[in-house]
Each structure stands twice: as structure tokens, then as C-alpha cells.
Amino acid sequence: MAKTTGVDIDAIIAANQRGPAGPKCNVCIALERMADDVRAKVQAAMDDRDRFGNRNLCDIINAIGVTSASGMPIEVGHNGVTRHRNGACAASRRHG
Ligand SMILES: [Zn+2]
């Protein structure tokens, strides 16, 4: 039987939990700002990883021309789309 020598497994596990969910990313904000029917179509494309790559999603969202509450255009980058799809932003908590 293997011996654990001086390893505080409880401390290691406690130190390696998921951190709090990150802030909403630009993709989250852009999705929130879209009309419901538009958001549903973008979300369907987002979920279809076979047909839509991160750059495709980026182009789709930027082509829609979403603006922030203050009227500024919201530009998303493919890295942002990647993070959003991978659940590295606040969206991760909603998807579990
Ligand atoms: Zn997001």
C-alpha cells in the first residue's frame, strides 16, 4: 500500500477548487443585447461546433452589430468566443 508522506491532501484539494465565475465576457453581453429571435439563432450556431468555428461565431456576432447600453459597438474577438464556449466566463456557472 502506498504511503502518503507529509502530504496534506485536504489542503491541496482546498487550494485547487474552481475559482468564482469570471465576469460576463463581451460575448455574454452581446448575447444579452440581441433580440430574442436573433439570440436563439446565434446560440444555436454557438452550440453547433461541427459547423461553426470560433472565428465564424466571431464574424456572425460582429456582423449583427450589437451595441452596448451606451450605444457603443460591442466587438467580440475569436479568443473571447473560445473562452465563452469553453465556459471560462460567467456563462460557465449557468451551464454548470
Ligand atoms: Zn461569456
Image (cartoon, grey):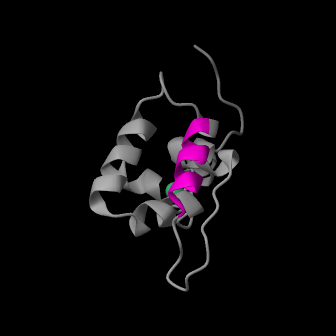
Residue 57 falls in which quadrant of the image?
Answer: top right
Q: Is residue 60 left or right of residue 77?
A: left
Dominant SS in magenta = helix
Q: Is residue 63 magenta?
A: yes
Residue at the spot 68% in from the left edge and 51% down from the top edge: 77
Percent coordinates x, y for residue 3 in the rendering: 64, 23
Residue most extreme to the top: 1
Residue at the spot 52% in from the left edge and 42% down from the top edge: 85
Q: Is residue 26 above or below residue 6?
A: below
Percent coordinates x, y for residue 41 in the rendering: 34, 45
Q: Is residue 50 left or right of residue 10?
A: left
Placement of the N terminus among the 4 image quadrants: top right
Percent coordinates x, y for residue 23 in the rendering: 56, 67
Residue 96 seen in the current view: no
Q: Is residue 32 left or right of residue 1?
A: left
Q: Across the whole image, how many numbered discs are drawn on residues?
A: 0
Residue 22 falls in which quadrant of the image?
Answer: bottom right
Q: Nearer the viewer, residue 90 or 70?
A: 70
Q: Is residue 70 above or below residue 29?
A: below
Residue 73 falls in which quadrant of the image?
Answer: bottom right
Residue at the spot 50% in from the left edge and 56% down from the top edge: 64
Q: Is residue 30 magenta?
A: no
Residue 58 seen in the current view: yes
Residue at the spot 53% in from the left edge and 46% down from the top edge: 60
Residue most extreme to the bottom: 70
Percent coordinates x, y for residue 31 in the rendering: 43, 60
Q: Nearer the viewer, residue 27 or 74?
A: 74
Magenta residue span = 56-65
